[in-house]
């Protein structure tokens, strides 16, 4: 079955509402300035449009068209009916964290590289293949179901989820949510929120699927992050989370540079990376082509090498390398994990049908709550 055929398979519920937003401080209901309830969004019968599969090449439809208006008008405020705390709405997106937080570098990179990794822009199903292969889910299973995406970045996986016809709630702690809105705001089944993984503004046990890719290792406490996020998945719901493999399992020269680079202002570090990649990437590519040992040799050069993805042209390869090299070096936190430690997390939560697979430098954890 092709992805496009899978998208149209009638296996979802087709009758859902977004779980209503809740105050992350006290769990109370939120109201807008007029006293109306906020956060659930309109009911929809059947999947949103856009399920014919990703566009091949060019700018995604949401990149040039009108942006989705968001939950409330800009400048509005959500206020908790319980404790009275107010939460601002920035450009249509509710914000439950301070503007300045530990993820400043991520907001910088994703707004700078809003389109770089979108399948619809690259013209290759790279993000779709990673999501579906890692999770073991199908588009037909996701259609019409509620999905929580934790740490969305610029929305490369948001796009894939929305194209299945899922009802997607996606959040990020950084200003990357605005890049996501600009690219994926065309999907009526998408809701975006700026929030922390430790205090998501949602009722617990309210989502059918949970996805968290490229996030856990960049949070202050990965174990707490993993266990907190699983609270928002319904019993019987399915999850897919990945995390960097421990240094002993995947050593890389970048780890020697991070104590210095993670303290640099994002704009300055980005300039250095942008200058270094054109010089170092050809060397990394040559080393990675050595039979048998190429992957290990490439780690001796501190730039991201995507040779395995088969990106079509030099400009695209360079852009991906700049983005991911900056991502490696700028993150305030990088806390890789061992398989044994991850297994312990899943056992503590009594998760079922757990699989912990290795994908290059990542462990991919999936299972059922």
Image (cartoon, helix red, strand yellow):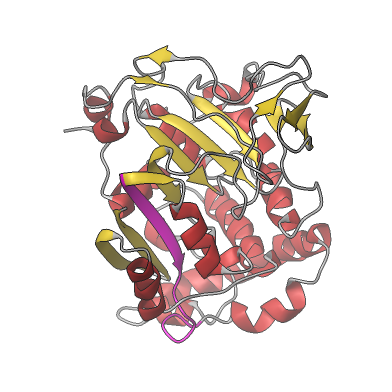
Q: Can residue 232 be found in the magenta stretch?
A: no
Residue at 45% in and 22% down: 17
Q: Residue 180, can we see it?
A: no
Residue furthest bottom in the image: 248
Q: How many marks?
A: 0
On screen, residue 227 above or below 170: below
Q: Residue at x 63, y 58 (%)?
A: 322
Q: Quadrant of the N terminus?
A: top left
Of residues 71 and 199, the one nearer the viewer is 199
- Picture layout, residue 31 above or below residue 264: above
Image coordinates of residue 358 in percent, x first then y, are: 33, 69
Going by the image, does 143 lie left or right of 309?
A: left
The answer to whether one can see residue 338 in this image is yes
Percent across and percent down for residue 143 are 31, 28
Q: Residue furthest left?
A: 1
Q: Quadrant of residue 163?
A: top left
Q: Is residue 266 above or below residue 166?
A: below
Q: Which residues are magenta?
A: 236-251
Residue 80 percent across, percent down from the top left? 72, 32
Determine the residue positioned at 46% across, 41% down: 148
Horizontal placement of 238 versus 329: left or right? left
Rendered location of residue 76, percent (x, y): 80, 23
């Amino acid at each position: 079955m092709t992805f496009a055929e899978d998208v149209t398979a009638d296996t979802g519920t087709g009758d859902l509402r977004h779980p209503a937003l809740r105050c992350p401080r006290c769990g109370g209901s939120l109201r807008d300035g007029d006293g109306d309830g906020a956060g659930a969004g309109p009911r929809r019968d059947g999947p949103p449009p856009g399920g014919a599969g990703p566009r091949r090449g060019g700018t995604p439809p949401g990149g040039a068209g009108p942006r989705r208006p968001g939950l409330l008008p800009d400048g509005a405020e959500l206020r908790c009916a319980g404790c009275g705390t107010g939460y601002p709405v920035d450009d249509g997106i509710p914000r439950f964290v301070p503007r300045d937080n530990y993820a400043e570098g991520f907001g910088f990179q994703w707004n700078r590289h809003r389109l770089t990794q979108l399948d619809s822009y690259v013209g290759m199903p790279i993000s779709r293949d990673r999501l579906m292969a890692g999770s073991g889910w199908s588009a037909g299973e996701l259609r019409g179901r509620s999905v929580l995406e934790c740490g969305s970045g610029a929305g490369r996986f948001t796009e894939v989820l929305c194209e299945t016809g899922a009802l997607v709630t996606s959040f990020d702690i950084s200003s990357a949510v605005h890049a996501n809105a600009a690219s994926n705001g065309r999907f009526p089944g998408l809701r975006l929120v700026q929030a922390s993984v430790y205090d998501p503004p949602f009722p617990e046990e309210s989502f059918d699927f949970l996805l968290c890719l490229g996030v856990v290792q960049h949070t202050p406490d990965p174990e707490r992050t993993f266990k907190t996020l699983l609270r928002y998945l319904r019993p019987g719901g399915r999850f897919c989370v990945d995390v960097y493999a421990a240094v002993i399992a995947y050593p890389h020269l970048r780890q020697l540079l991070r104590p210095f680079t993670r303290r640099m202002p994002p704009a300055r570090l980005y300039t250095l990376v942008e200058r270094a990649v054109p010089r170092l990437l050809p060397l990394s590519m040559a080393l990675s082509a050595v039979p048998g040992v190429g992957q290990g040799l490439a780690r001796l050069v501190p730039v991201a090498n995507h040779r395995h993805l088969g990106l079509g042209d030099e400009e695209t390869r360079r852009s991906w390398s700049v983005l991911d090299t900056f991502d490696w070096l700028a993150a305030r936190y990088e806390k890789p994990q061992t398989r044994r430690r991850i297994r312990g997390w899943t056992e503590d939560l009594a998760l079922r049908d757990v699989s912990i697979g290795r994908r290059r430098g990542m462990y991919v954890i999936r299972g059922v709550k």
